[in-house]
Image: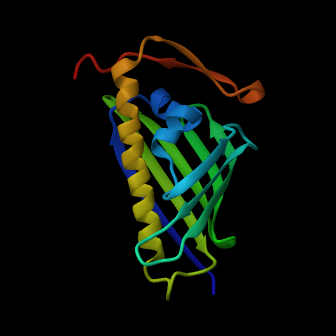
Amino acid sequence: MVRHDTFTISRHLDAPPAEVFMAFADTAIRRRWFRLPGSGASYEHDFRVGGGETARSTFTGLDTAPERLEYRSRYIDIAGTHRIVYGYEALVDGELRWTSLVTVRLDAETDGTCLEWTEQVTFLRYEGDGSVDLAHLRGGSVLRLNGLDAALQPLQASATAGRVRIGSGDQSAEHNVSKRWEHR
């Protein structure tokens, strides 16, 4: 049986939208907050419409057999520093467990960015009776966003005024990166 769910997470980040956007676009920064649990992880990231990300790892829990985890995404829409839309698949031991459409909105606020993460998920295979799957997925997204907030801290501490080029070809854009944290 297939089950559909949707959830939204909103949070304030103490960085301007361009810096939050860069944390999604720049692979080195993204690695600081987007990770699969387990060991032996591998990652590939191509931040452009039509590009995507793959990640693989092996997770071993207490008293459980190792599980091979795989994440595959494709970027559908990147609208400047305001919106990122992508779809992804989550596989465990080669079996497709769920697929999601994620919309990330970044809205400027006086003292940072309001990030709104909306995920529309289709569960194809359940863990047990499926009653904990949505909570598990939402909890994992909250942990990632906690990691995003932590990854932004070094950017804020070491940023200098200037322009940063993100992407290539038609998807390329220049974004201002400014010092916003002197008031802290």
* Camera-side residue of 159 and 39: 39
Of residue 169 and residue 33, the one placed in the foreground of this image is 33
Residue 24 horizontal side relative to residue 145, left or right = right
Residue 48 vertical position relative to residue 96 in the rendered view, above or below? above
> For the point 52% across and 40% down, which residue is it?
31
Q: Where's residue 154, x and y in %?
A: 37, 27
In the picture, which quadrant includes the N terminus? Answer: bottom right
- The image quadrant where one finds the C terminus is top left
Residue at image x 46%, y 28%? 19
Task: Give above or below for 90 relative to 72.
Answer: below
Residue 9 in view in this figure: no
Image location (x, y in percent) of residue 60: 49, 68
Q: Residue at x 57, y 18 (%)?
A: 164
Question: Is 88 displayed left or right of 144 in the figure?
Answer: right
**Residue reaching furthest to the left:** 184
Q: Quadrant of residue 131?
A: bottom left
* Residue 104 location (% of width, % of height): 52, 47
**Residue at 59% in and 43% down:** 84
Foreground of the two, 55 or 179:
55
Q: Is residue 105 above or below residue 37?
A: above
Q: Name the quadrant containing residue 171.
A: top right
Its colouring scheme is rainbow
Tally of numbered tags: 0
Q: Is residue 143 left or right of residue 65?
A: left
Residue 130 placed where, x, y %? 50, 83
**Is residue 182 something that shows in the picture?**
yes
Q: Specify the quadrant of the image occupied by residue 167.
A: top right
For residue 101, above or below residue 105: below
